[in-house]
Image: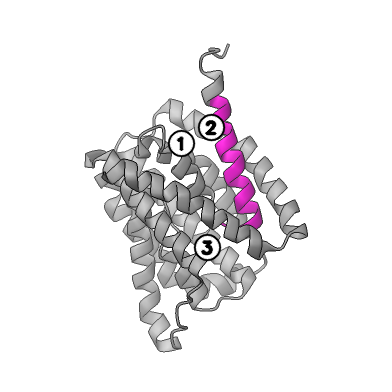
Amino acid sequence: MLDSSLLPQALIVAGIFLLGGFVKGVVGFGLPTITLGLLALTRPLPEAMALAVAPTLATNIWQGLAGGQLRATFLRLRGFLLLSGVGTLAVSGLLARSDARLLAGLLGILVVASSLLSLLGPRWPQPSAERERWLSPVMGLLSGIANGLTGSYMMPAAPWLSAIRLPPDQFVQGFGLGATLVTATLALGLAGQGMISTELGLGGLAVLAPTFLGLWLGRLVRAALAEKWFRQAVQAFLLLIGLQLVIRGLF
């Protein structure tokens, strides 16, 4: 029987993943950024990352396989995807030896940077085909390193995939493939460091239901709502979370 003292905390965690799934359903990304941003306000970031592994991996597998553009997307992004996994695996072991508050502050900086980039509207210039071939693995490596240290795959992955002007379906599917790879790699790194306990693993499975419920609701809203305005509201919300994480983690 569930301890009544734990029920409010369990409901808060479920609500966080419901919100994260809802946002992902509307805009195609944002689940780990939102869930980690909120969870890290009350618990160590490595613990929050371990809890988010199962729902993040499950939703990204679904996103990466859906859309009908799997072959074309993989062929164009194979260097980006491969180096994303390498970067994540290379630094994930640092989590066990790092200051959790500092990592939370770093996550906050990445969230603030991503939000400001979206809110202010600058777009990266489209690289030539030749530059894309060598820049794509570099961007993948940087995205993997950021993910391995903070659990966030947003920077610079999302701006880069936007800069190379992927068609919408390939953008969503490509981000899903990359996020699937780095989440699985991060899970291996965390497990190797003994940072995914049975309790956290079961907790991650328990929040699958609210996450997919939020995803379903978000897709309904996405079909009826102008995505541009909702995306702006999401980024403003993330900006506030990021600023709070920076203040708590670095000051």
Q: Main secondary structure of the magenta part?
A: helix
Cβ–Cβ below 8 Å for labels 3 and 2? no
Q: CA distance from mark 3 to mark 2?
A: 25 Å
- The residue shown at (32%, 53%) is 89
Q: Earlier in the sequence, mark 3 or mark 2?
A: 2
Q: Which mark is residue 51?
A: 1
Residue 131, image x and y in percent? 38, 85
Which residue is the site of mark 3?
Answer: 175
Q: The N terminus appears in which quarter of the rendering? A: top right
Q: Earlier in the sequence, mark 2 or mark 1?
A: 2
Cβ–Cβ below 8 Å for labels 2 and 1? yes
Give the quarter of the image for residue 68.
Answer: bottom right
Vertical comparison of 22 with 232: above or below: above
Residue 26 located left or right of residue 110: right
Which residue is the site of mark 2?
Answer: 13
Q: CA distance from mark 2 to mark 1?
A: 10 Å
State which mark lies toward you, 2 or 1.
Answer: 2
Residue 66, image x and y in percent? 65, 60
Q: Which residues are magenta?
A: 10-29
Residue 24 lies in the magenta-colored region: yes
Give the amino acid type for the residue marked by disc 1 in the picture.
Leu
The answer to whether residue 220 is seen in the rendering is: yes
